[in-house]
Amino acid sequence: MSLVYITIISSNLLNHFVYPGCVFFGTVLGYNFLKYYIIFYKGEFHTKKYYGILTVSILAAIGMISLFFMMSTTIQISILFSVFFVAIYPFLRRFGWLKLFVVSFVVTFITVYIPFIFYKPIVLDYYLTLIQRFLIVISLLIPFEILDSETDCKTMNTLPQRFGIQKAKLFGILLVVPFIVLEFLKVNSSLVVIPIGIITVLAIHFTSLKRNDYYTSFWVESIPIVWVILVFFYK
């Protein structure tokens, strides 16, 4: 949702709560589906925690579906396209080197392509934003890839497993460079990309196998939230 609002605010697009709200509920539902679908499918609710997660998922589904039917057919079809990729993601995870780019593609599609659907004419800033978002999402996923490299099946050949942690870090850090440079080719450029780029580089640099889950699930995940706050105040 933060990434959607970054696109809307930075590109002066029409601000409407319906689509960002749908993305918010869809993200909650999609995450819970990917993480807990086996437990839900088998009905293995051993603790109250899973009943809570199921309740949240049902509420998120209601919220997403309600907002989904308030949007145009064009956007609905685009959302369904995204849902398809989320649904097949468990099957794509076995291709570890590929999943990084698939996730980044889907996030870019949801947070840049769809918000621009009714923006005419399409300007250079749109194409630059597409490339930027694709690059920065890959960079932000590198810490997750590294922390998961020990628990992921070795046959997955994720980036850290295939090339090593240091090379995976270097890859993620290098992608931040064009992310920043491309911003200054835009008509509506913003200096906010510089601190976000620096924060992303630091997040990648300090990633290690000794970090706990909160390093990625809280600190790294919160970078887009910091980004949208900076964009809101310093656009």
Image: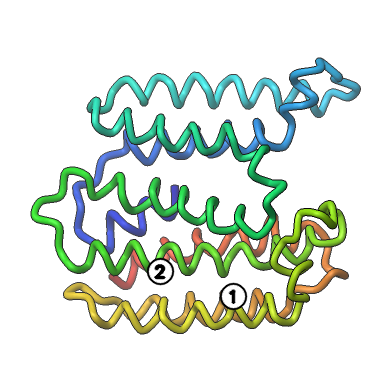
Residue 209 falls left or right of residue 37 = right
Front-most of 32 and 88? 88
Front-most of 110 and 189? 110
Residue 24 falls left or right of residue 88 = left
Badge 2: residue crowd in 10 Å (few <14, some 14–19, many ≥20) = some
| Type of amino acid under label 1 | Gly
Residue 84 spot, x, y in % from top left: 49, 32
| Type of amino acid under label 2 | Leu
Q: Which mark is residue 230?
A: 2
* Residue with the most extreme top position: 43
Q: Secondary structure at mark 2?
A: helix
Residue 204 spot, x, y in % from top left: 66, 75
CA–CA distance in space, label 1 to label 2: 22 Å
* Residue shown at 25% from the left, 76% from the top: 189
Q: Nearer the viewer, mark 1 or mark 2?
A: 1
Residue 117 falls left or right of residue 198 = left
* Residue shown at 65% from the left, 74% from the top: 203
Mark earlier in primary sequence (1, 2):
1
Badge 1: residue crowd in 10 Å (few <14, some 14–19, many ≥20) = many
Residue 30 image-quadrant placement: top right
* Residue shown at 75% from the left, 21% from the top: 40
Front-most of 179 and 27? 179
Residue 94 spot, x, y in % from top left: 72, 47
Total count of labels: 2
Provide the residue designation for mark 1. 172
Residue 230 image-quadrant placement: bottom left
Residue 108 spot, x, y in % from top left: 41, 54
